[in-house]
Amino acid sequence: MKKVVVGMSGGVDSSVAALLLKNQGYDVMGVTMQLWQDEDRCTMEENGGCCGLSAVEDAKRVCACIGIPHYVMNFKQEFRRDVIDYFTGEYLKGHTPNPCIACNRYLKWQALYERSLTLGADYIATGHYARIHQKENGRYTIYTSETAAKDQTYVLYNLTQKQLSHTLMPIGEYEKDKVRQIAEEAGLPVAHKKDSQDICFVPDGDYAGFLERELGKKNLPPEGDFVDLSGKVLGRHKGIFHYTIGQRKGLGIALGEPAFVVRIDAEKNQVIIGKNSDVFTNSLRADRLNFMAEEYFSTEKKYMAKIRYSDPGSFCRVQMTGEDEMELSFPEKVRAVTPGQAAVLYNEEGEIVGGGTIL
């Protein structure tokens, strides 16, 4: 009997994943990762957070209901190093990071899998809305789930071939409503628990406030200049970490017409402002590449690229500009290409071919 460790956040998705695997005959154990527990308990419960104390309690109750063992593993040190430090470091560079991508690659897969090996596990499993497929070329890839509105493939593009070969994602075949129905019929206590929102360690969505609490105001970039595309000073900004590409609201500057953040120059401590049309571009560069369905990107093929989690995708061509760098060109301009976010490429079958971090 194959042994599976299910990463259990205390939510309905991971709970149903554990239930389905148990019913399929696997030897299942649930593991809740203690990552970040300094947030107010009530806040975490209200937001359905996956990292707080309530997650441990809910996961424990679910495991008792299913009849599987439950363990709690402390990954605070790894979370600090691979997610929090990365998150704060990117904002200091004027980038807008996606910490869920880093958390998936280095915590929920690499660290959890390595720890699971000590328990004799053959696989790890999660409650992500995605599906894993091994292609004829032998490579593993991830493709879109049955629930398009909940599809989570974008934040999984950075997983390695080894990680994918030891991963199960059982709820990728189901719609969200069906997942809740399965949980309700099985009497799981989290059947109607709210989905987690935003970044788990910033449940209020105030990233600037988090950075101020985490690093201290004296360690953050100071106020600087708003400038236009020609370099003309337009006013003063509150610190580059308050802004992201394409932002319009909250700029605190009146120009007589709508103004948008076009670029952030961390070296000069400037936020470049322009019109909405200035936020569109036909190209982007990305590095720190990861290949999934294919061993390389073909210049002959046309791919679909997503440049943020909520992006429906745009057709593009790929040109390798270095061993670990690519340039994407789009026949139709895309909006708000944001350094620090991921550019994830899909083929015609909806499989992830690979991706990288936008420069």
Image: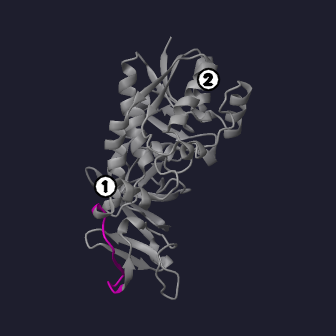
Q: Is residue 112 visible?
A: yes
Residue at numbered disc 2: 19
Residue displayed at 36% across by 68% down: 240
Q: In this picture, is 31 found above or below 312? A: above
Q: Position of residue 5 (x, y in %)?
A: 48, 23
Q: How many labels sit on residues?
A: 2
Q: In this picture, is 246 found above or below 195? A: below
Name the outermost residue toward the bottom.
256
Q: Disc 2 or 1, which lies upstream in sequence?
A: 2
Amino acid at dot 1: Gly
Please, what is the dominant secondary structure of the magenta stretch? loop
Q: Position of residue 157 (x, y in %)?
A: 43, 44
Residue 229, magenta (yes or no): yes
Residue 160 or 207: which is nearer the viewer? Answer: 207
Residue at numbered disc 1: 89
Amino acid at dot 2: Leu
The magenta-colored residue range is 219-233
How crowded pointer 1 is (Cα within 10 Å; few <14, some 14-19, many 20+) is rated as some
SS assignment at label 2:
helix
Residue displayed at 37% across by 24% down: 115
Residue 354 or 17: which is nearer the viewer? Answer: 17
Q: Quadrant of residue 123?
A: top left
SS assignment at label 1:
helix
Residue 108 or 292: which is nearer the viewer? Answer: 108
Q: Is residue 359 visible?
A: no
Residue 147 lies left or right of residue 83; in this view the side is: right
Q: Distance of mark 2 from mark 1, alpha carbons?
A: 39 Å
Q: Position of residue 82 (x, y in %)?
A: 33, 43
Q: In this picture, is 62 found above or below 236? A: above
Residue 36 or 320: which is nearer the viewer? Answer: 36
Name the outermost residue toward the top.
1
